[in-house]
Image: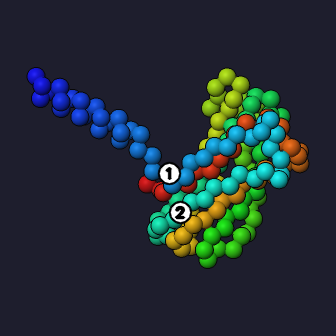
Amino acid sequence: MKIVFRFTFILWIAVTFSACNDHALVDTFESIPNQNWTYIKPIKAKVEISDSTKTYNIYVNFRHTADYRYSNIWLRFHVFGPKLRDFPERKEFQLALADGSWLGKGSGNLFSYQLIYKEGYKFPSSGTYTIIVEQNMRDNPLKYIADVGIRVEPVK
């Protein structure tokens, strides 16, 4: 009986830890003060790339309240690192359908998204990179933005 109990316990531990195994190199969420995201407060994350032959997905973690008044958001990206000059890139993300239904996962008054910025991206060399995300809408500050972050994970 003790052997069965030990085996079950070890199996439970193994399943628990394998379910929590997240391969992301970085996964951040920064709270936006007073839910007012200004141009001068970009979100930054550093990521250490040890294998430049691998491909990576880069996401923006994003949360807004139901009071957000647009169906989209424009973001501006910068990626700095070894052998990489900054070429700012502006990109639009849809947050709602034409009927006004939010596309994000809702929890009360808060809607969450994981927006893909780069899919299958190859960093030019190994080293430390800094990824910067800025809001690039006409409104400054952009109201009702709760949290913004960056996630980088190797492609499986």
Name which residue lies at 28% across and 31% down.
12
Point out residue 143 in the picture as x, y percentages from the top left corner.
83, 37
Number of numbered discs present?
Answer: 2
Spatial CA span between label 2 and label 1: 11 Å
The disc at residue 24 is 1
**Residue type highlighted by circle 1:** Ala
Mark 2 crowd level (few <14, some 14–19, many ≥20, 10 Å Cα): few
Residue 96 horizontal side relative to residue 122, left or right: right
| Scheme by which the image is coloured | rainbow
Which residue is more in the foreground, 114 or 7?
Answer: 7
148 relative to 109, above or below: below
Name which residue lies at 50% across and 51% down.
24
Instruction: Residue lying at the far bottom in this picture: please name it.
Output: 83
Inspect this view and state whether residue 35 appears. Answer: yes
Mark 1 crowd level (few <14, some 14–19, many ≥20, 10 Å Cα): some
**Residue type highlighted by circle 2:** Glu
| Viewer-side label of 2, 1 | 2
Name which residue lies at 29% across and 38% down.
14
Q: Which quadrant of the rendered structure holds the C terminus? A: bottom left
Residue 74 horizontal side relative to residue 153, left or right: right
The disc at residue 48 is 2
